[in-house]
Amino acid sequence: MLNRILALAKKEVRQLRRDTRMLLIIFLFPILLLVIFGYAINFDVHHIKIAIYDRDKSEDTRAFINALTSSSYFDLVGTITNDSQIKKYLDGQTAQAVIVFPENMSRTMYSKGDARVQILVDGVNGNTATLIMNYLNLATMSYSQNFSKETLALSGRGTYVPLDVEPVFWFNPSLDSTHFLIPGLIAMIMIITAVISISLSIVREKELGTIEQINVSPLSSLELIIGKTLPHAFISLMVAVFILISGYLLFSMPVKGNLILLLLTTLVFIFASLSLGIFVSSIANNQQVAFQMATLMSMLPSVILSGFIFPIESMPLFVQILSNITPAKFYSIILRDILLKGVGLESFWPQVVYLLIFSGVFLGIATLRNRKMRTV
């Protein structure tokens, strides 16, 4: 049995070595996706375009504006001089937010009154609008606290804060959204590469007619699947290492956990992905159909349902249940746990068990279909 599997694996390696275009796609396509998605998808909002309508024109409003524009979060794109210009700035998308300082704001502040600053935000993109409002609220609160401290200090009184909050962010202290996205991106790239490569490899045997020779050989269905899977598993593992190194070099992706655990869980995910590809090959009869099915069954669920971009917790219940059809969802959790948190198997063993069950189910179905086809 072992000799037959090794012989088939050697044949598969020779075919892959001859197909240089496929090898280029397997190794270059993941890096291309990593670079495009890694730089294009970013939830951090910087360089927010703001316009100022300063009706007070005091030293305090100028200090507030300087505090905003000295950071990378805000860019001052214009100064408004009358009410009618506010609509023009927001309608033309010249500014994403307009800040209106009321008349006599400075005098109100020093007389211990409540000065109300109006903030008008373009709400077409709800997520971005919420982030802009949060940034501006935090900037306003920070300025108000500093103003209170300075005013009390001038009057000879100290400040007293009965309850002070000191937030500490674990695992991703800089709150860099790229570090959250990269594990999901790696899972998506690996499943697409693995499913497409093995499904095309097996279906090519059908198109060339060589699968008939294999069917009449002493090779069993299980041996056929194992012999076909081993070379692609090794290549997928090399691609995974290549992507992880690229993620570290390009995006400073940390690796806090155990590397051996990372290797073993990656192998489990690769076998789950390859089992899906073998299942596709048991249905498709030509490479065009196989490519379309492999792309549809690997890319679509891993982008929409894996939690890579859209949080699963905010989806309706039936969509949350449907999200279990993609192994990328579970591998993303494993990667974040190992890369960002540095935790061990005790934190993500249910995900590993699911990947093993997924592999067993799809390999079983593919084996049964292949055995049925050979007996026809």
Image (spheres, rainbow, N blue to C red):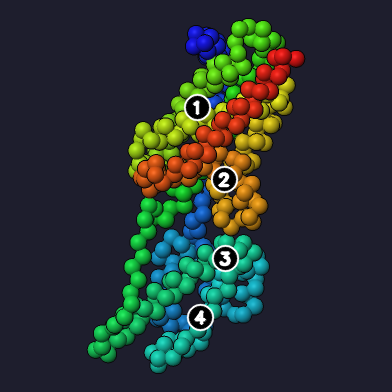
Q: x%, y% of residue 305? A: 60, 46
Residue 21 appearing in the image? no
Q: Earlier in the sequence, mark 3 or mark 2?
A: 3
Foreground pick, 293 / 229: 229
Of the two numbered discs 1 and 2 on the same chain, state the one appearing first in sequence.
Answer: 1
Alpha carbon of mark 4 to alpha carbon of mark 2: how far? 42 Å
CB-based contact (under 8 Å), mark 1 and mark 2: no
Q: Is residue 99 above or below residue 371?
A: below
Residue at image position (51%, 87%) is: 103
Disc 3 and disc 4: Cα gap in Å? 17 Å
Residue identifier under label 2? 306
Q: Amino acid at mark 1?
A: Ser
Question: Could you say which quadrant of the image residue 71 lies in?
Answer: bottom left
Task: Identify the disc placed on residue 336.
Answer: none
Q: Amino acid at mark 2?
A: Ser
Residue 232 locus on image (x, y percent) = 53, 22
Camera-nearest residue between 163 and 214: 214
- Residue at 58% x, 74% y is 120
Q: Which residue is mark 4?
A: 117
Q: Amino acid at mark 3?
A: Ala
Which of marks 4 and 3 precedes in the sequence? 4
Dot 1: element: helix
Q: Residues within 10 Å of mark 2 (few under 14, many from 20)?
A: many
Label 4 vs label 1, nearer the camera: 1
Kindly state the secondary structure of the residue where label 4 is placed.
Answer: loop
Q: CA distance from mark 1 to mark 2?
A: 20 Å
| Residue under pointer 3 | 129
Q: Residues within 10 Å of mark 1 (few under 14, many from 20)?
A: many
What's the CA distance linking mark 1 and mark 3?
41 Å
